[in-house]
Amino acid sequence: LHTLQDIERQISPDPHRNPDGTYADRTIDIDIMGIEGVTMNTPELTLPHPHLAERDFFMQPLRELQQEIAESCNDSTISTHSGH
């Protein structure tokens, strides 16, 4: 975690919050989706990330992967049951 935070600071040293507490745009922002089912809530890190479901840049690729997996499962199920 600290290594990733150091990389963020090297690339974008400005704070990630504005003086009023709102988020500031940064050159890079590394969001950790999750780590092998780990759940944690500390001042430094919350897993899974509490706002990922609100972020289209995360949800859209996830939906595409889910669709591809579902189609792949359906294709192999159909082939198995049809004797192909």
Image: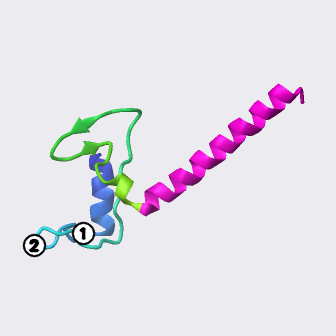
The magenta region covers 56-84
Is residue 67 on the magenta stretch? yes
Q: Is residue 7 left or right of residue 23?
A: right
Kind of residue at disc 1: Pro
Residues at discs 1 and 2 in contact (Cβ within 8 Å) = no
How crowded pointer 1 is (Cα within 10 Å; few <14, some 14-19, many 20+) is rated as few
Provide the major secondary structure of the magenta segment.
helix
* Of callouts 1 and 2, the N-terminal one: 1
Q: Is residue 21 left or right of residue 28?
A: left
Residue depicted at 28% across the width and 49% down the height: 50
Q: Position of residue 66 (x, y in %)?
A: 57, 46
- Residue closest to the eye, 72 or 46: 72
Residue depicted at 71% across the width and 40% down the height: 72
Q: For residue 76, which numbered disc appears in the image?
A: none
**SS type, badge 1:** loop
How crowded pointer 2 is (Cα within 10 Å; few <14, some 14-19, many 20+) is rated as few
Tell me which corner region of the image, top left, top right, bottom left or bottom right, holds residue 22: bottom left
Q: Position of residue 17 (x, y in %)?
A: 18, 68
Tell me which corner region of the image, top left, top right, bottom left or bottom right, holds residue 48: top left
Q: For residue 13, which numbered disc appears in the image?
A: 1
Q: Please say if 3 is above or below 41.
A: below
- Residue closest to the eye, 29 or 23: 23
Is residue 63 on the magenta stretch? yes
Q: Position of residue 76 (x, y in %)?
A: 76, 34
Tell me which corner region of the image, top left, top right, bottom left or bottom right, holds residue 26: bottom left
Q: Quadrant of the C terminus?
A: top right
Q: Which residue is mark 2?
A: 20
**SS type, badge 2:** loop
